[in-house]
Image: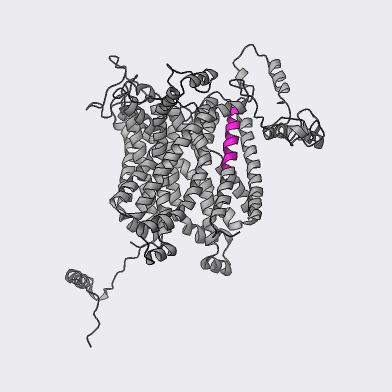
Amino acid sequence: MTKYVIRRVIQAIPVLFGITIVVYGILLAAPGGPTAKFNNNPRVTLADREAFKRSWGLDQPIPVQYCRWLGACNPNVDDKILGILPTPAALLGPSGWPNILPQGISGSSNGILHGDFGVSVDSGEPVGPRIARAALPTFILATFALIIWIAIAILIGVYAAVKRYSLFDQIATIFAYVGYAMPTFWLGIMLIYLFSGPGLHLLPAGGMTTTRVSPPFGSNEYWVYFGQKPIAAILDIGAHLILPVFTLVVVNIAGDSRFVRASMLEALSQDYVRTAKAKGLSGRSVTFKHALRNALLPVVTNIGLEIPFLFTGAIVTETIFSWPGIGKLTIDSTNAFDYPTLMGLLLITSVLVVFANLVADVAYAFVDPRIKF
Amino acid sequence: MTEPRLPAVTEPALEEIERRADEAGQDYEVQLESLNQWQLAWRKFRKHKLALIGLGILVFLIVAAIVGPILSPFVFNQIPKPDKTVYAGRPPSLAHLFGETGGLQRDVLQLVVNGARTSLIIGFTSMAIGVLIGTIVGSIAGYVGGFLDNVLMRIVDVMLSLPLLFVILVASKFFGNGNVLLIIVIFGLLSWMGIARLVRSLFLSIREREFVEAAKAVGVRDRRIIFRHILPNAVSPIVVSASLIVAGNIITEAFVSFLGFGVNPIYPTWGNVLSNALTFIPVGNWWWPFFPGLAIILTVLAVNFIGDGLRDALDPRSRV
């Protein structure tokens, strides 16, 4: 078991390394380069741009820049091999220990390995806190959606598998087909028309809080307001949550209920289920105690793999309902060519995916004794 | 002891055989219909009701995309001058079956018909690029194996760890320039990983089968083994996932263009004709976003049904 875990962790390292190269490639490929935002500013002269590049280390060769961005190189050492590669001396931090180690040992705090994602070229604030602030609304939205859609998907899937080819099963199949074919953004627009259009003013069309009543979510004023009227604030967010959560639930149930159904059908055809039935156990006991528990194993793994994609996967829903989360931050940063933020978002999500894969594999091997190493 | 019964031959069939025998004279032989692989597949495909419906819908949409803009009384590039200001547009009527958009008061039916062309082209050609790359990478990794396999599969792992919608958005904004061709290339380059994994696993299992061993023993060259012996046996799963890619790419392109990151609005797609639709929802204009979305749903359903039908039809073990 330990050997298996270690092997999987070692396998993940080249993938993580590849991800950093792809993410860094996006910075290099960004149109106009890092000084693009000065292009239309007549006050910034060419000399100013060169000075800007020098002060941010952008005049260095790409391997050195990458090494510093990663946090493996000391940004204060300028020596180079052949004019392009960082010297071994550059790999050591100010304290003499390798630069890659935590700040307490190496004495330097540059690069993503030290948690430094740079500064947003759009708003000028550090990328890390910016992403952290947008993560809370996304977390709230994703958690509610996830709990509801898993519960409903399991109910539908199990019932459809137990009553195979029944009317319910067929309706669930049609629903899954249509749900899969339905673009998320279209569903969102139609829901806005139905529930907050001119006919019914039942639910808010977008945002996370009512602008007239409360300060924008996440600001200091908001937490003051939250302290004064916690119940009103929570109810307000709740009302804004209904439509986006409903959208996410409908779209995701389609695939997951099929998955649960397939997994349940496989479990129901196993020998131990037949044995349990032959022993005279009641149908309900066989279904829920013997089949369901085994059928849920792959389901849980599958859901584990979906969670990191919720982090950005809600881009569509968040955009339509102008939910102030990671998805909206993504769209805003793309519009502003704010690649430090984009790189941070891309990096965090990708690492989450690799981590979730790892945890899912190990957890699956742990709970299913049939898997041998 | 009774004689063993022969299989029952119905009277009309017997008569038909005798009639044909008379016509053909003495040289009459029973003509067995011999069908090749594709004819057999088509025969099975025809039995799949939903797949036939899907094919019908898709053919209808393709025909509409080709001749629709010609037959339509409106020209896409001409924006009619509204005779009076109707901010929210007009709901569906006989003159405008799908209604009129808010603001510029354009005919929604004409937007949908014009959008079909670009949307379908993007969906299918980007799938073709993705399948081509995925099949090449997957067959090399699966057939050659070893170090090369390891490197290629780690690349696939990295690509699959990236949130694809995110990468597509950023790539379309950074490199797309609203150009249809570039958007197709971006979608194609980002949709091959699933196929590559699939093809690799198929190659790994088919490579070990007896007929491949036999071909190797006879001295068949590697290239011929890959193209004549292994690949034809891998076609059916590839076709099914290709249909999923078409569906996914049409939906994603619609969203990316809806946001204004995708195709330039002078080339209408089902996504970018909606770019202002959200503004007019509060004044009650539901028909503008509704019909292009309906077109997307119909296309995706049709493509998925065809994929299902092809899976059954191309699987040599399935009997209908």
**Residue B179 visible in the shown view:** yes
Q: Is residue A87 left or right of residue B128?
A: right
Quarter the N terminus of chain B occupies: bottom left
Residue B215 location, quadrant: bottom right
| Residue depicted at 55% across the width and 62% down the height | B207
Q: Position of residue A86 (x, y in %)?
A: 77, 35
Q: Position of residue B251 (x, y in %)?
A: 42, 37
Q: Which residue range is magenta in the image?
A: A339-353
Magenta highlight: main SS: helix
Q: Is residue A101 left or right of residue A209?
A: right
Q: Position of residue B313 (x, y in %)?
A: 37, 57
| Residue depicted at 26% across the width and 25% down the height | B91
Across the whole image, how many numbered discs are drawn on residues? 0
Q: Is residue A74 left or right of residue B94?
A: right
Q: Nearer the viewer, residue B76 or A199?
A: A199
Q: Nearer the viewer, residue A271 or B94?
A: A271
Residue B170 location, quadrant: top right
**Residue B269 visible in the shown view:** no
| Residue depicted at 38% across the width and 51% down the height | A158
| Residue depicted at 57% across the width and 25% down the height | A337
Q: Position of residue B244 (x, y in %)?
A: 43, 46
Q: Is residue A257 above or below residue B235?
A: above
Quarter the C terminus of chain B occupies: bottom left
